[in-house]
Image (cartoon, rainbow, N blue to C red):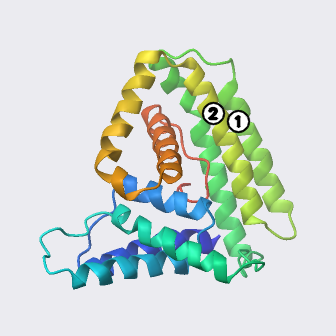
């Protein structure tokens, strides 16, 4: 699990280091990092893409336009990833954490999942207050599924974080599907408009398939935040 969190923090630190300031990453930047991770782009490739972007920027005669967003690095990251794939055909790098069996790490993960399950149980009141009509006991069922998964984590002899993340993502996708089905067209269009406006100034630097993935992720993030639904992901579960 440590490797999953390091993916985010090391990218953030490298971007800040290259820029020379402690600039906070935007929600778009975080969503972009998530899309890199889910696309299977190794951490070292993303860091290399950031370095290449800033190196090219440093050679430009005019420095009036600064690299203010991680999206400026996306093309370089994707180019580096293509080269990596060409030179690493047939190789599969192990992504499993070497410390997965560490009991302290397991305990922390269990606490995170239990805390998130408790938060899910509080969502129905907020959803009802917002005027949404959802299937009876839906969030209680999802919370129960998360608690069952927590018991599996507790009993497993060896943890597979990649598989765990996939199962958590499936639960989150079910929540999103139910929310979208309960929303009226006006609300959905409003959220889509917000996402589109945030992405407008970054569209030129992204490939179509990458942009589509980013739009879906930002749409999901905004819907969950709007109704106070906790993220079911190892990246976003509360640490304390």
Is residue 239 something that shows in the picture?
Answer: no
**Residue at 51% across, 53% down:** 210
Tell me whether circle 1 and circle 2 mark residues in contact (CB < 8 Å). yes
- Secondary structure under tag 2 reads helix
Residue 213 vs residue 178, the one in the foreground: 213
**Residue at 61% across, 42% down:** 118
Is residue 131 something that shows in the picture?
Answer: yes
Q: Position of residue 116 (x, y in %)?
A: 60, 47
> How far is mark 1 from mark 2, CA to CA?
8 Å
Q: Quadrant of residue 135?
A: top right
**Residue at 84% across, 70% down:** 158
- In the rendered structure, the answer to whether residue 71 lies left or right of residue 115 reads left
- Secondary structure under tag 1 reads helix
Q: Eyeballing the image, is 163 above or below 181?
A: below
Residue 200 vs residue 190, the one in the foreground: 200
Q: Eyeballing the image, is 119 above or below 45?
A: above
Q: Quadrant of residue 103?
A: bottom right
Residue highlighted by disc 2: 175
- In the rendered structure, the answer to whether residue 117 lies left or right of residue 196 reads right
Q: Position of residue 51 (x, y in %)?
A: 38, 82
Mark 1 is surrounded, within 10 Å at the Cα level, by few (under 14), some (14 to 19) or many (20 or more) other residues, namely some
- What numbered label is drawn on residue 142? 1
Q: Earlier in the sequence, mark 1 or mark 2?
A: 1
- In the rendered structure, the answer to whether residue 223 lies left or right of residue 83 reads left
Q: Position of residue 200 (x, y in %)?
A: 31, 45
């Amino acid at each position: 699990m440590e490797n999953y969190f390091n993916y985010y923090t090391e990218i953030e630190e490298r971007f800040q280091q290259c820029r020379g300031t402690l600039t906070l990453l935007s929600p778009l930047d975080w969503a972009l990092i998530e899309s890199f991770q889910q696309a299977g782009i190794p951490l070292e490739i993303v860091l290399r893409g950031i370095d290449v972007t800033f190196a090219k920027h440093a050679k430009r005669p005019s420095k009036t336009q600064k690299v203010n967003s991680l999206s400026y690095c996306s093309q370089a990251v994707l180019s580096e990833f293509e080269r990596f794939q060409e030179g690493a055909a047939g190789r599969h790098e192990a992504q499993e954490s070497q410390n997965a069996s560490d009991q302290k790490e397991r305990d922390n993960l269990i606490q995170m999942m239990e805390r998130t399950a408790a938060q899910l149980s509080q969502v129905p009141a907020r959803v009802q207050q917002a005027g949404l009509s959802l299937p009876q006991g839906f969030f209680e069922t999802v919370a129960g599924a998360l608690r069952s998964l927590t018991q599996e984590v507790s009993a497993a002899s060896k943890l597979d974080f990649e598989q765990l993340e996939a199962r958590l993502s499936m639960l989150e996708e079910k929540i999103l599907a139910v929310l979208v089905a309960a929303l009226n067209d006006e609300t959905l269009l409003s959220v889509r408009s917000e996402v589109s406006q945030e992405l407008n100034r970054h569209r030129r630097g992204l490939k179509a398939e990458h942009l589509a993935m980013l739009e879906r992720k930002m749409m999901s993030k905004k819907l969950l935040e709007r109704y106070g639904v906790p993220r079911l992901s190892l990246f976003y579960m509360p640490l304390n």
